[in-house]
Image (cartoon, rainbow, N blue to C red):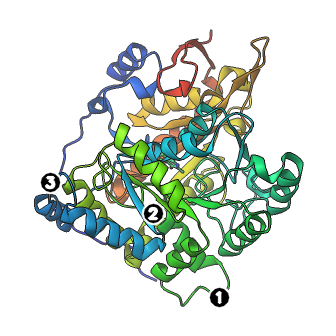
Amino acid sequence: MKTIIEPFKIKSVEPIKFTTRDERERILKEAYYNVFLIPAEEVLIDLLTDSGTSAMSADQWAGIMKGDESYAGARSFYRFEKKVRELTGLKHIIPTHQGRAAERILFSIVGGKGKYVPNNSHFDTTRANVEFSGAEAVDLPTEEGKRPEVIADFKGNMDVPSLEAFIKKVGRENIPLCMITVTNNSGGGQPVSMKNIRETKSVCTKYGIPFFLDACRFAENAYFIKKREPGYANISVKQIVQEMFSYADGATMSAKKDALVNMGGFLAINDDKLATSARNLLIVTEGFPTYGGLAGRDLEAIAQGLDEILDEHYLQYRIRSVEYLGEKLTKAGVAILQPPGGHAIYLDAKRILPHIPPGEYPGQSLVAELYRVGGIRAVEIGSVMFGKYESDGQLIPARMELVRLAIPRRVYTQSHIDYVIEVVVETFEKRQALKGYEIVEEAPMLRHFTAKFSPMN
Ligand SMILES: *Cc1c(COP(=O)(O)O)cnc(C)c1O
């Protein structure tokens, strides 16, 4: 088999800025060791997120020019709606400015005190929106999904027996909907099998609970199903996507992921009454239902991106380039969440830095060091992001201490990735010298975005 190459050539380039180690040390300090507070210009390779960081295609840029900016009923909206409906089969397609806007609208209608929302694993904004409504966000990953060293095909799966037990425990009337996140972002970008989606749907149907997909990475998930799940090898990714959505009563989507755009999202639902309430809220906070906080050109680019994401050469390159990074790091002895996920490699900071306890944020330490060593920006997905406090102020650590290296779509080449490998391996070799961090300032919700840190002595 020949090398899997980037299935595109580069038409437009964006220079990246090189800094010295001394400059990076100063920049880190000025940002209180929180890489979210570092100006992007000072970052060499930005792996903070794959969200909204995709490179658009020539056809998407052409769509930007063709965008219809009419306030109501724009042509671009109808193209967007048609494309989303073609893939999801869902009745009401409601554009939003990004995924969390869809979540906020959905959970402010169905959430509230005394309600529970089960999910294979909530993403941070999803959890925040569920909890902001007063409801409780409940993660039900499988046992193998909780173990970063286990290699399995579908570690993103929902624990279906636990879901049923949970429904019986709290009562179906207290569960407004059940969600599956594809791929499972917080669980390591791991895919969910079609069988698991089907079984989850069947439990939901048994208890009369609507089933929703958090569909941000639907195409990556579908490609994994094609590669790994018996019976799907000869089915097109598009058909797999359509089958996945055929089980859903609704979906939330951040178009900043698998729609290959820099901004956008949608809420799609079958229920007429729910859709009416959602549109009413949309008008108050996002915009008229045919633009929902987006420009016509954005809707045009999303429609085009939803076509391009299904290109199987693209998906092969996408999944393989992440796997390549994972393989090289594993070979060098770096502990990562296995197997490599769809959009990112997750370094296992708990195993890499066993000398730093969770209360001193080993993931944060690794993130700061990757920037210091090579100007790489990663993100902590551990006790900084998901830690909570006991009433006496004691930290309840997250289940895992991960550092995510998210790969923007169509942005970096193989030599960029080779450089990343070199920096991670160098950091790994000097891991004994790394120290923990303490939080000196934080917000009550989503604290990782703005928290200020100080290195421990
Ligand atoms: C990014 C993401 C969201 C939120 O979308 P935004 O566009 O960032 O608001 C929700 N769920 C998952 C799984 C995501 O990856």
The kind of secondary structure element at disc 3 is loop
x, y percent for residue 190 = 62, 59
Q: Residue 64 falls in which quadrant of the image?
A: bottom left
x, y percent for residue 322 = 49, 59
262 is higher (above) or lower (below) than 435: below
207 is higher (above) or lower (below) than 136: below
Real-space Cα distance between discs 2 and 1? 25 Å
Which disc number belongs to residue 321?
2
Which disc number belongs to residue 363?
none
| Residue plotted at (89% across, 48% down) | 169
Left or right, 365 with respect to 286, comes to right
x, y percent for residue 237 = 48, 79
Real-space Cα distance between discs 3 and 1? 44 Å
| Residue plotted at (88% across, 55% down) | 165
| Residue plotted at (57% across, 86% down) | 233
The kind of secondary structure element at disc 2 is helix
Mark 1: amino acid: Gly
Residue hosting label 1? 231
| Residue plotted at (79% across, 11% down) | 392
* Nearer to us: label 2 or label 1: 1
